[in-house]
Image (tube, rainbow, N blue to C red):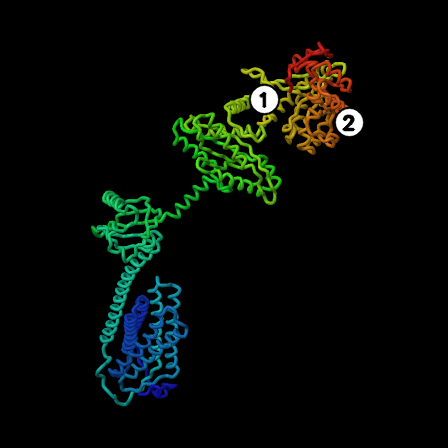
Amino acid sequence: MAILDKLILDPHAIDAVQGAYDIHLVLLSWLIALAAAYTSLDIIKLTRQVRRAALRWLWLCSGASVMGLGVWSMHFIGMHAYRLDFPVSHAPSLTLISILPAILGSLGTMAVLSQSHASHGALLWAGMGLGGGIGLMHYTGMAAMRMPAELYHATGLFLLSLLIAVGLGILSVYAYRLFRREWGARRAKTCAFVSALCVSLAICGMHYIAMEAAWFAPLPSPLTSPQAMGIGSHWLSYLIGGGVALIAILTLVATHVSRRLQASAYHQHMTRAHLLEVISALHDGVVLFDDKARVRLCNTAFERLLGWSRQESIGCSVWHLTYTHDSEALNKQIGQALEKTGEWRGEIEARHRNGQCFPAQLNVSRVTYADGDERDYVALLSDRSAEQRAQQRIRHLAYHDTLTGLPNRRALQDRLADYDEGHDKGRPWMSLALLDVNRFKALNDSLGPDTGDELLRQLAARLQRWTRTGVYAARLDGNEFALLVDLSATDESAARQEAGRLIDEAVADLSADYPLHGHTYPCRLNVGMYVFSPGEPSTVGQRLKRVALALLEAKRQRDGHPRLFHPHFEQELEARVILERELRYAIDSDELCLHLQPQVDARQRIIGAEALVRWEHPKRGRIPPGHFIPVAEETGLIVPLGNWVLKEGCRLLGEWRRAPTRRDLKLSLNVSVRQFQQPDFVDQVLSAIRQHDAPPERLTLELTESLMLSDPGGTIEKMAMLRDIGISFALDDFGTGYSSLTYLQSLPLDILKIDIAFVRDLTREMQAPPIAATIIALADSMGLSVVAEGVETQEQHEVLGDLGCGIYQGYLFAPPLPVEAFRELPSRLVAETEDAKSPPLRS
């Protein structure tokens, strides 16, 4: 009968009736639909893993068949759950044909969902196809009904059933895709269940809404009797439901087994493939060989390193591959180690097939398998060329100067040590020379460090011309270079002559003018030399120290001539070191004392004294100031020494202040340049004065001209601060330096002291008296007092008196005396003889 002809708006108008449902069969029908939908959707996961197209479509058809069968079974059971008051049967052929729309709709849906990136259009068509297949299957099945009644459909419910089928079908497709993307493959079963739930709702919703749309109008007499497919018993429904459930379960088991088999095969394939890819990606050569040394596997790096292709290597004995210059001996050694310990490793010189050699690390290890007695061996060959080049670079940087490229101090020390190990006593002599660029700092300060570096590079280039056999050049640091020369002489005297001749030639070449960025620089060198025999009992450090002492002597002489080491250089250095240590102790241990040399006026009355420091050594006795004062200036001990003199002088002034016969005397203290330049010098003076209650107007500080030249601004400021409290200043040794009259005019001075050199020459040189007269006249014009020091004869005293000098100091009147002896001097001194002489020592 035609369905569309049976659509009605009001079923009651034709006295149509509806049946009732068996709830158990309704629930069974929904479970059958859910199981079938889940099974078919779960198959989609399997189809994603199948790579063969035929097998993939076979699984898709199987899944579609299961879903179509489930939809048909749900419809068939649902029809049996629908009870009418008259018998109903189904036409077998049309009933079986009704399964086809469900299978085709399910196949289209699964085909779309099995794709990784399906478009929205494809998803819509798949959902519509699924809903349309379900609807077509249902109404085709209902058309197969045979019963003594006319079948009618309510128009609204009929359209609603189709809308539910299509809508829920589309919703099921999108739900599966959405959950698949959100939850991923790890929750594929949950995704399939949720989507199957939507599909089962679509199937059941469409079926039971469609059944609500169906109305039956009984005929006066039955048309047919139930025959082929009666509905009088429940067992057929349960049998069909059980059959479909069994088919779904078997299908699920089949998909699970197939999935596991495919996963295992894929894992095995990928494990081997990944292993080969990993081995091929290694930069080290890998070779796997069996217990008979036959190569089973090798990677690309092995081919690249040794030149043996994979086709040539596979199956070949690894011992027949030439991979080093003596493969046979090494193979024997490796074989013995493998039998004994199961591994061998070492550094080798590997050789490419074309003969090119390179350093390499070779590791060979035994591979023991857990599932058998079979043993293989794996060899790992690592190219160490880059590492060796890096080590050579590091070694070069460690032993060479980066600016000049010459060997450095460490390289020179190793070279000297090698000579000691390689030479016996009595073998040829050697010469070690140190060269220092004179006034290099001045060049850097005037033309810049780039110019200084350029000079060093050019000097190194000239030195490299001398690095022939037997000559070794190095740059030690800064502007200091070294030359180590193998001499051919057999005795010390000849060796020194030969060394001197070679150094003179080298210095003449190295001292030639250098073009430096548009300037011509006349390079001058200071040279120290040390001639020695490699077998002599001296260390490398001692030799470098001795040649450094010779260079230091050359710098002191400043005549440009090389200086050969002499043992007394070492003795002097040792003596200076001892003297420095003992002087430091003496300052802290009260071994020092002050001696006072009187200063007298024209009538030889004592008006003051100059304090001179003396050192009474407990073992060596009195040490002359000319010995320890230079050491103090070089080592910086002059600062604590000057502080001691300042405090001791202020202590004496404090004592004299309380002595009626000495309270008017003035005391002069010598201040060194370094002491005066201390930032807290003014505070030190003020502290000493306050501590000992010394009258500042009786204190005179003697300064030198070099202090005026070094820092005139700071000097004047400090002098002004101290002069404000009454301290006087004297300019010592005036006329021997480079004083500027401008500075002299601006300095707050009180006294000029004529140097002893001018006083000594007053009766010897014709030019001395005019110089002394000029100094006295200059001082008089500036309102300064004049003190002549070093007066030793009556003639000098008379000449100075005639020139207008008013204050005198010297051995003619009294030598420097201890403080106790100074206290015993009368207030007026008279020279015993006109020709009184004194020792030439003065400090």
Left or right of residue 688: residue 550? left
Count of all numbered marks drawn on residues in the image:
2
Q: Residues within 10 Å of mark 1 (few under 14, many from 20)?
A: some
Residue 780, image x, y percentages: 78, 24
Measured along the vertical axis of the image, is residue 75 above or below residue 467? below
Q: Is residue 656 visible?
A: no
Which SS class for mark 2? Answer: loop
Q: Quadrant of residue 813?
A: top right
* Residue ID at (51%, 27%): 564
Residue picked out by circle 2? 782
Residue 266 shown left or right of residue 775 in the figure: left
Can residue 307 be seen by looking at this rendering?
Answer: yes
Return the residue nearer the eye: 638 or 406: 406
Q: Amino acid at mark 2?
A: Met
Residue 420 is labelled as none
Please give the residue where the numbered disc 1 appears in the rendered image. 628
Measure the C-alpha gap from mark 2 to mark 1.
36 Å
Q: Residue 59's quadrant in the figure? A: bottom left
| First along the sequence among labels 2 and 1 | 1
How far across and how far down the image is residue 15, in percent?
A: 34, 87
Q: Position of residue 500 (x, y in %)?
A: 51, 30
State the residue in front, 146 or 47: 47
166, 578: nearer the viewer: 578
Q: For mark 2, does the 10 Å Cα neighbourhood hold few (<14), some (14 to 19), or many (20 or more) residues?
A: few
Q: Is residue 372 left or right of residue 545?
A: left
Check disc 1 and report its element: helix, strand or loop: helix
Quarter of the image with the N terminus is bottom left
Where is residue 835? Give x, y as percent: 70, 11
Q: Does the CB distance between marks 2 and 1 fall below 8 Å?
A: no
- Name the kind of residue labelled 1 in the image: Phe
> Measured along the vertical axis of the image, is residue 2 above or below residue 710?
below
